[in-house]
Amino acid sequence: MRRWLDSVLNRDARLQVVGMAGTAEEARAVIKATQPDVLTLDIEMPGMNGLEFLSHIMRLRPMPVVMLSSRFDKNLSFVAKAKQIGAVACVKKPVFPTPTAVQHLCDQIVAAVRGTTGAQKTSSLAPRTAANSKVILIGASTGGVAAIEALLSQTPQDAPPIVIAQHMPHAFLVSFVERLNRLSGRNVDFAQDGDVLNPGEVRIAPSQAMQTCIAWHSNAWRIQHVEQQPEHMFCPSVDVLFSSAAPWARYVAAALLTGLGTDGARGMQTLLQNGAQTVVQSQESCVVYGMPGAAQRLGAAQHEVDIGEIGPLLMKLVATPVHMGGGL
């Protein structure tokens, strides 16, 4: 991993790797000798782990630190702890090192130095305008894997960011994220607290003790995690995801796909009442019509179409510019 990082970071004209270390003891010596502008730090290291070392850094030699680990999607507490200690950003090691994933990593490291991580990507990000600041939210349960794959195949690579809540045990979601990465050719990853959502990216809500929400602030869409509450029947909860976007509903298109139960129906109703565009999957194309049917009974769905039509319809709905004053 260190050799790979050295290779990809040095290929970015904005970055130069001045040293590498495999342990905290080695890292101390490298930091002292090279005085780096930013440090990437893994959680798992021999001897002192990354979080302990991060604590020492923040006490003795404060500097921008980007935590880079494969464990963030498996245990969200690592993210919260690292940011509490002082990490500027927490980035999951790319499952597949696509050019988009590598660019995202490099942008996060550069942004850490410039003090803009979590606010926006750096030079590669186009200015936020009404045309590129929409977001698409999707909820699904039983039968959702095939439906989501079909929907993503119908949307362009530069589509607005997509956030998905799919009912599934976390171990299966890990495989699902990997599969979507392979099939879609996009930057597909788990939603992490503080993530900035950019066009073309897909984020999957993890199935753990934290619920995934979105919010618009500092000129960007961001992921926010909140603690699961006793009244939340599911994690991830489609209702929680949808409802979180209600203050910015004019800039949201939401789709509720096949699934058992009613999760997402009330959240979709809240979005519609606040100005969002809403779509549900047709009964004929659903494996289970429970969730879309519940939304229809509440009058929360503006459109009901077959799964093969949802992607193009969503693109049509988000294509109309919206004035970016007021709530955004």
Image: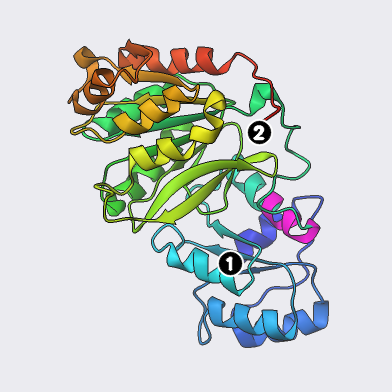
Res. 328 mark: 2
Q: Is residue 62 above or below residue 178?
A: below
- Label 2 neighbourhood size at 10 Å, few (<14), some (14-19), many (20+)? some
Which image quadrant is residue 55 in?
Answer: bottom right
Residue in the picture at 57% in, 26% down:
251
From where the camera sits, is residue 150 visible? Answer: yes
Q: Nearer the viewer, residue 202 or 118?
A: 118
Magenta includes 108?
A: yes
Q: Which amino acid type is shown beneath numbered disc 2?
A: Leu
> Is residue 175 left or right of 274 when viewed as pictured?
left
Q: Amino acid at mark 1?
A: Lys
Query: Secondary structure beneath disc 1?
Result: helix
Q: Main secondary structure of the magenta part?
A: helix
Q: Quadrant of the C terminus?
A: top right
233 in magenta: no
Q: Which residues are magenta?
A: 107-114
Quarter of image, res 74: bottom left
- The percent coordinates of residue 91 (x first, y second) are 57, 57
Q: Position of residue 162 (x, y in %)?
A: 49, 33
| Circle 1 residue | 83
